[in-house]
Image (tube, rainbow, N blue to C red):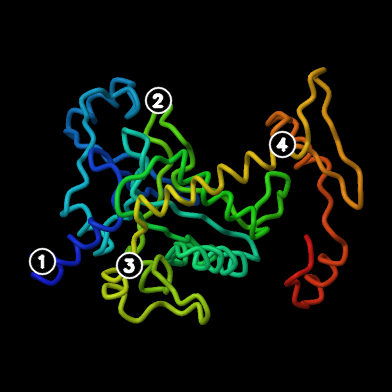
Amino acid sequence: MSTSVEINNIQLFKSVFTGREDVFAVRWEKGSKSGYMPAYFYDPYRYRVHKMNGGTFQNYLDKEHLLLSEREIEKHLNGEQHIGIYPLLKDNTSWFIVADFDKVEWVEDCKKFINACNEKGISAYLERSRSGKGGHVWIFFEQPYPAIKSRKIFISILEQTGVFSLFDKSSSFDRMFPNQDFLSGKGFGNLIALPLYKKTYEQGNSCFIDVESLEPIPHQWDFIKNIQKISTVKLDELHQIYNAQQDILASIVPKSHNEKLTIRLANDIKINRFAISTALINFLKEELNFLNTEFLVKKKIGKNTFGTER
């Protein structure tokens, strides 16, 4: 039975890490494989009969999604199950946005992104991932905010810091949560694993860490209680700024009226990214993207690569 303190923590946790409550996911592991799947309620006896008759869980119809209750969150915090939530709500808004980083430079890139957010008056919080080999930078909103707007804001900040580029496949930035502007109608969107899962938390992972020391914050619950959320007014201001900047960038290279791509050659090569297709962007990123040899040499011999272009 939970104590009153634990109940308060559960309620606090649910109020901060808010996503869809009509469905959630749980982590599964089988041998070397693992993943997340929606949590269901079903009669195991009936399912066993269904399976004996050649059926699968996928085509088993007598099941329904479990609701994300306080009891399910308690099981997560106690280490009984690792929960993932779906941040994109039915109206295509979310209560937060998270930038996911991995690869070798994840710490450096997380710091750059967090500093850039702080400079703009945005509170951003670093969680070390379950594996310990990556980080999640969380940004929370006072009210649900349209994903199409929040994603534009924070992808723009990532681009300005040099952490992310559509053409850079070596970036430690992996994705945003939510990872789409709108629900497709065929699923729940991507999910994010919640922090403070007991078993990995005890290893110093799945918890919030100090940006400088990278050590776990000593009192996680006090830390979470004092998380600062961004107002809708502030988000709207940022969205207007980045919308205006995007309009300016789009006008730098005039759009061609004869279906030809305009390229400007100077000390560097400038291509209007708004005039090229996603397929071409992916081709340039995968086939014509060369790392700076100076960066590679410094990285290989262990020298500081800060300020050196990749």
Marks 3 and 4, how far apart in space?
Answer: 39 Å
Which comes sooner in the sequence, label 4 or label 1?
Answer: 1
Residue 98 in the image, given as x and y percentages of width and height = 45, 54
Q: Which residue is mark 2?
A: 186
Q: Which residue is mark 1?
A: 2
Residue 239 in the image, given as x and y percentages of width and height = 49, 46
Which comes sooner in the sequence, label 2 or label 4?
Answer: 2
| Closer to the camera in the image, 169 or 81 | 169
When asked about the image quadrant of residue 139, the answer is bottom left
Marks 2 and 3, how far apart in space?
Answer: 34 Å
Marks 4 and 1, how far apart in space?
Answer: 59 Å
At 56% across and 58% down in the image, what residue appears?
101
Marks 2 and 1, how far apart in space?
Answer: 37 Å
Mark 1 element type: loop
Mark 3 element type: loop
Q: Tags 3 and 4 in contact by the CB under 8 Å rule? A: no
Which comes sooner in the sequence, label 2 or label 1?
Answer: 1
Mark nearer the viewer, 3 or 1: 3
Q: Which residue is mark 4?
A: 251
Residue 263 horizontal side relative to residue 6, left or right: right
Query: In the image, what residue type sits under mark 1?
Result: Ser
Residue 138's label in the rendered image is none
Query: In the image, what residue type sits under mark 3?
Result: Ile
